[in-house]
Amino acid sequence: MDKPATAHLLEAGEMGLLGEHHPLVEQLGLAEEMHPLTSAASCLKMPPVTDLDTLRRFLRTYQSRILLPLELPAIHQACLHAAAHRTRELIQLDQQLLASVQFLEFANASRRTGQAQLRKLKPLRDVRILQRYLSAVELNQAQGWHTVVFGLTLAVYSVPLRQGLLGYSQQVLRGFMHMAGKRFPVSAADIEELMAELNAPLPVALGSLLLLEQFER
Protein backbone atom coordinates (compact mmCIF):
# COMPACT_ATOMS: atom_id res chain seq x y z
CA MET A 1 0.00 0.00 0.00
CA ASP A 2 1.34 3.46 -0.83
CA LYS A 3 2.68 5.32 2.16
CA PRO A 4 0.75 8.56 1.43
CA ALA A 5 -2.55 6.68 1.74
CA THR A 6 -1.69 5.42 5.19
CA ALA A 7 0.73 8.05 6.45
CA HIS A 8 0.59 8.77 10.16
CA LEU A 9 -1.12 12.12 9.90
CA LEU A 10 -0.51 14.78 12.53
CA GLU A 11 2.53 13.02 13.98
CA ALA A 12 5.83 14.81 14.37
CA GLY A 13 6.80 16.76 11.27
CA GLU A 14 3.45 16.36 9.49
CA MET A 15 1.51 19.04 11.37
CA GLY A 16 3.81 21.89 10.57
CA LEU A 17 1.19 23.75 8.57
CA LEU A 18 -0.94 23.99 11.71
CA GLY A 19 1.57 24.04 14.55
CA GLU A 20 1.82 21.84 17.60
CA HIS A 21 -0.66 23.92 19.61
CA HIS A 22 -3.31 24.04 16.90
CA PRO A 23 -6.83 23.06 18.12
CA LEU A 24 -6.85 20.05 15.82
CA VAL A 25 -3.80 18.62 17.55
CA GLU A 26 -5.51 19.01 20.88
CA GLN A 27 -8.73 17.49 19.57
CA LEU A 28 -6.89 14.47 18.24
CA GLY A 29 -5.24 14.02 21.60
CA LEU A 30 -8.63 14.17 23.29
CA ALA A 31 -10.09 11.70 20.80
CA GLU A 32 -7.21 9.32 21.46
CA GLU A 33 -8.02 9.27 25.17
CA MET A 34 -11.80 9.58 24.94
CA HIS A 35 -12.78 5.93 25.22
CA PRO A 36 -11.21 4.07 28.17
CA LEU A 37 -10.25 0.66 26.87
CA THR A 38 -12.14 -1.34 29.50
CA SER A 39 -15.45 0.48 29.08
CA ALA A 40 -15.09 0.50 25.29
CA ALA A 41 -14.64 -3.27 25.19
CA SER A 42 -17.55 -3.77 27.59
CA CYS A 43 -19.80 -1.49 25.55
CA LEU A 44 -19.07 -3.54 22.44
CA LYS A 45 -19.70 -6.74 24.42
CA MET A 46 -16.12 -7.79 23.87
CA PRO A 47 -13.98 -9.75 26.34
CA PRO A 48 -11.43 -7.73 28.34
CA VAL A 49 -8.34 -6.74 26.37
CA THR A 50 -5.59 -8.73 28.06
CA ASP A 51 -3.17 -9.65 25.27
CA LEU A 52 -2.31 -8.93 21.67
CA ASP A 53 -4.96 -11.28 20.30
CA THR A 54 -7.84 -9.72 22.26
CA LEU A 55 -6.51 -6.25 21.37
CA ARG A 56 -6.59 -7.16 17.67
CA ARG A 57 -10.15 -8.47 17.93
CA PHE A 58 -11.28 -5.38 19.84
CA LEU A 59 -9.72 -3.00 17.30
CA ARG A 60 -11.32 -4.82 14.38
CA THR A 61 -14.72 -4.64 16.08
CA TYR A 62 -14.36 -0.99 17.05
CA GLN A 63 -13.32 -0.10 13.53
CA SER A 64 -16.15 -2.03 11.87
CA ARG A 65 -18.94 -1.02 14.28
CA ILE A 66 -18.02 2.49 15.45
CA LEU A 67 -15.23 4.17 13.49
CA LEU A 68 -16.16 3.42 9.89
CA PRO A 69 -19.98 3.40 10.00
CA LEU A 70 -20.55 6.10 12.66
CA GLU A 71 -17.64 8.39 13.49
CA LEU A 72 -16.10 9.04 10.07
CA PRO A 73 -19.44 9.73 8.31
CA ALA A 74 -20.39 12.16 11.11
CA ILE A 75 -17.07 14.02 10.79
CA HIS A 76 -17.46 14.07 7.01
CA GLN A 77 -20.98 15.47 7.07
CA ALA A 78 -20.16 18.04 9.74
CA CYS A 79 -17.19 19.29 7.73
CA LEU A 80 -19.26 19.64 4.55
CA HIS A 81 -22.06 21.51 6.32
CA ALA A 82 -19.63 23.82 8.10
CA ALA A 83 -17.62 24.54 4.96
CA ALA A 84 -20.85 25.51 3.17
CA HIS A 85 -22.05 27.58 6.15
CA ARG A 86 -25.12 25.36 6.57
CA THR A 87 -25.88 25.98 10.24
CA ARG A 88 -29.35 24.46 10.21
CA GLU A 89 -28.08 21.27 8.58
CA LEU A 90 -25.19 21.05 11.05
CA ILE A 91 -27.62 21.22 13.98
CA GLN A 92 -29.91 18.70 12.30
CA LEU A 93 -26.96 16.33 11.91
CA ASP A 94 -26.26 16.69 15.62
CA GLN A 95 -29.89 15.89 16.43
CA GLN A 96 -29.91 12.90 14.07
CA LEU A 97 -26.88 11.48 15.84
CA LEU A 98 -28.72 11.74 19.15
CA ALA A 99 -31.68 9.83 17.69
CA SER A 100 -29.39 7.08 16.42
CA VAL A 101 -27.27 6.61 19.57
CA GLN A 102 -26.42 2.92 19.93
CA PHE A 103 -23.68 3.03 22.56
CA LEU A 104 -24.58 5.16 25.57
CA GLU A 105 -21.09 5.16 27.11
CA PHE A 106 -19.55 6.31 23.84
CA ALA A 107 -22.26 8.96 23.52
CA ASN A 108 -21.59 10.41 26.97
CA ALA A 109 -17.85 10.55 26.34
CA SER A 110 -18.42 12.08 22.91
CA ARG A 111 -20.63 14.81 24.33
CA ARG A 112 -18.19 15.72 27.10
CA THR A 113 -15.19 15.81 24.79
CA GLY A 114 -16.93 17.76 22.04
CA GLN A 115 -18.42 20.38 24.33
CA ALA A 116 -15.10 20.93 26.08
CA GLN A 117 -13.34 21.53 22.78
CA LEU A 118 -16.15 23.70 21.47
CA ARG A 119 -15.79 26.02 24.45
CA LYS A 120 -12.10 26.39 23.67
CA LEU A 121 -13.00 27.53 20.15
CA LYS A 122 -15.39 30.18 21.48
CA PRO A 123 -12.88 33.05 21.05
CA LEU A 124 -13.23 32.67 17.26
CA ARG A 125 -15.98 35.28 17.28
CA ASP A 126 -15.87 35.94 13.55
CA VAL A 127 -16.69 32.32 12.60
CA ARG A 128 -20.47 32.54 12.45
CA ILE A 129 -21.28 28.88 12.01
CA LEU A 130 -19.10 28.02 15.00
CA GLN A 131 -20.80 30.61 17.17
CA ARG A 132 -24.27 29.56 16.06
CA TYR A 133 -23.55 25.91 16.73
CA LEU A 134 -22.08 26.77 20.11
CA SER A 135 -25.21 28.77 20.91
CA ALA A 136 -27.38 25.78 19.96
CA VAL A 137 -25.36 23.57 22.31
CA GLU A 138 -25.65 26.09 25.13
CA LEU A 139 -29.42 26.22 24.59
CA ASN A 140 -29.61 22.38 24.62
CA GLN A 141 -30.72 22.38 21.00
CA ALA A 142 -27.64 20.34 20.06
CA GLN A 143 -25.36 17.93 21.90
CA GLY A 144 -21.90 19.00 20.74
CA TRP A 145 -20.71 15.53 19.71
CA HIS A 146 -16.93 15.28 19.36
CA THR A 147 -17.29 14.09 15.77
CA VAL A 148 -19.40 17.11 14.80
CA VAL A 149 -16.98 19.48 16.53
CA PHE A 150 -14.02 17.80 14.84
CA GLY A 151 -15.62 18.09 11.40
CA LEU A 152 -16.49 21.71 12.12
CA THR A 153 -12.89 22.40 13.12
CA LEU A 154 -11.57 20.83 9.93
CA ALA A 155 -13.72 23.29 7.97
CA VAL A 156 -12.80 26.30 10.11
CA TYR A 157 -9.08 25.69 9.54
CA SER A 158 -9.45 24.52 5.92
CA VAL A 159 -7.82 21.14 6.53
CA PRO A 160 -8.38 18.73 3.60
CA LEU A 161 -11.14 16.32 4.50
CA ARG A 162 -9.27 13.16 3.53
CA GLN A 163 -6.31 14.28 5.63
CA GLY A 164 -8.51 14.98 8.63
CA LEU A 165 -10.39 11.68 8.41
CA LEU A 166 -7.16 9.72 8.11
CA GLY A 167 -5.66 11.60 11.01
CA TYR A 168 -8.63 10.92 13.24
CA SER A 169 -8.71 7.22 12.35
CA GLN A 170 -5.04 6.65 12.95
CA GLN A 171 -4.82 8.66 16.16
CA VAL A 172 -7.77 6.92 17.81
CA LEU A 173 -6.60 3.43 16.85
CA ARG A 174 -3.07 4.14 18.05
CA GLY A 175 -4.52 5.57 21.24
CA PHE A 176 -6.18 2.24 22.03
CA MET A 177 -2.89 0.47 21.37
CA HIS A 178 -1.01 2.80 23.69
CA MET A 179 -3.59 2.24 26.42
CA ALA A 180 -3.24 -1.51 25.98
CA GLY A 181 0.53 -1.15 26.21
CA LYS A 182 0.13 0.01 29.81
CA ARG A 183 -1.31 -3.42 30.68
CA PHE A 184 0.81 -5.84 28.69
CA PRO A 185 3.77 -5.64 26.30
CA VAL A 186 2.91 -4.06 22.94
CA SER A 187 6.03 -3.48 20.90
CA ALA A 188 6.54 -0.91 18.18
CA ALA A 189 6.56 -3.78 15.69
CA ASP A 190 3.20 -4.99 17.05
CA ILE A 191 1.73 -1.51 16.60
CA GLU A 192 2.97 -1.21 13.04
CA GLU A 193 1.63 -4.67 12.20
CA LEU A 194 -1.78 -3.82 13.66
CA MET A 195 -1.87 -0.47 11.89
CA ALA A 196 -1.03 -2.07 8.55
CA GLU A 197 -3.96 -4.45 9.01
CA LEU A 198 -6.36 -1.74 10.18
CA ASN A 199 -5.30 0.67 7.44
CA ALA A 200 -6.38 -1.81 4.76
CA PRO A 201 -10.11 -0.87 4.67
CA LEU A 202 -9.53 2.88 5.02
CA PRO A 203 -8.92 3.80 1.36
CA VAL A 204 -12.20 2.18 0.27
CA ALA A 205 -14.15 3.69 3.18
CA LEU A 206 -12.74 7.16 2.61
CA GLY A 207 -13.19 6.83 -1.12
CA SER A 208 -16.88 6.15 -0.64
CA LEU A 209 -17.30 9.17 1.63
CA LEU A 210 -15.39 11.50 -0.65
CA LEU A 211 -17.33 10.27 -3.69
CA LEU A 212 -20.53 11.17 -1.84
CA GLU A 213 -19.03 14.61 -1.22
CA GLN A 214 -18.90 15.27 -4.97
CA PHE A 215 -22.64 14.75 -5.27
CA GLU A 216 -23.45 17.00 -2.30
CA ARG A 217 -21.55 20.02 -3.53
Image (spheres, rainbow, N blue to C red):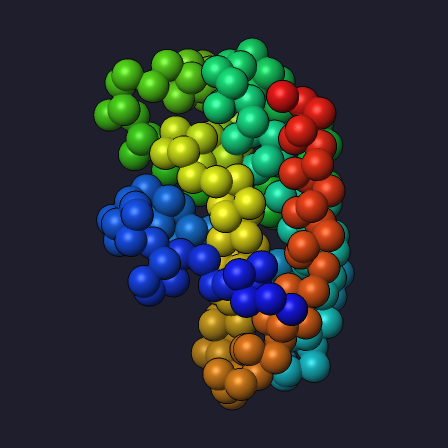
Which of the 4 quarters of the picture holds residue 154?
A: top left
Residue 39 or 134: which is nearer the viewer?
Answer: 134
**Which residue: 24% across, 25% down?**
123
Position of residue 13 in the picture relative to residue 135 (left or right): left
- Classify 206 as above or below 40: above
Q: Is residue 158 above or below residue 123?
A: below
Quadrant of image for the N terminus = bottom right
Q: Is residue 12 visible?
A: yes
Left or right of 163 in this view: 67: right
Residue 104 image position (x, y, % from top left):
65, 43
Give the quadrant of residue 39.
Answer: bottom right
- 44 with respect to 113 (left or right): right
- Please state if 123 lies on the left or on the right of 205 as rendered: left
Q: Residue at x 53, y 85 (%)?
A: 189
Please name whichever residue, 217 or 156, is drawn nearer the observer in this view of the structure.
217
Quarter of the rendering occupied by the C terminus = top right
